[in-house]
Amino acid sequence: MEGTKGNFRVHDFIKPFNEKEGSFYAVANSKWAELSLGCIPEPSEFKIAANLPQEALMVVEFGQLVHAIRSGEAQPEKKWPVISRKTQVVIDAVVTSIKNGFVPVEVVY
């Protein structure tokens, strides 16, 4: 992901290469290098240690969110139903395109 204040890159968000740590690259105040071949300064790699695989951590986080909502400590975020529905519409369009010989498919939300 690139923006006006820097860059952020995660190689494999869904299934990490190493279950004991997750890594990402980030840099602030960057700009495109000559011919748009990379950015200046180069991003630094950050590694985050994990005591459980990512899949288990996602289940733990989900359980904590549900507990917080049920106990009244938190409220559900309103943006996620919209984001998840839009994501599903795009996925459905991709599947339809593939099934129909890779033709363009209109995405309607």
Image (cartoon, helix red, strand yellow):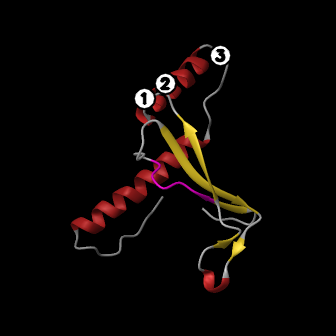
Residue with the mark numbered 2: 60
* Label 3 – label 2 distance at C-alpha: 18 Å
Residue 11 horizontal side relative to residue 44, left or right: left
Residue 102 horizontal side relative to residue 21, left or right: left
* Label 3 – label 1 distance at C-alpha: 25 Å
Name which quarter of the figure residue 78 lies in.
top right
Residue 69 screen position, x and y as percent:
60, 21
**Element at badge 2?**
helix
Of the residues shown, which amino acid type is indicated by label 3? Gly
47 up-or-down from 93: above or below: above
Part of the protein shown in magenta: 8-13
Residue 2 screen position, x and y as percent:
64, 65
Q: Residue 72 carries which label?
A: 3
Q: Does the magenta stretch include residue 11?
A: yes
Residue at the image point whose x is 71% and y is 68% from the top: 41
Residue with the mark numbered 1: 56
Of the residues shown, which amino acid type is indicated by label 2? Val
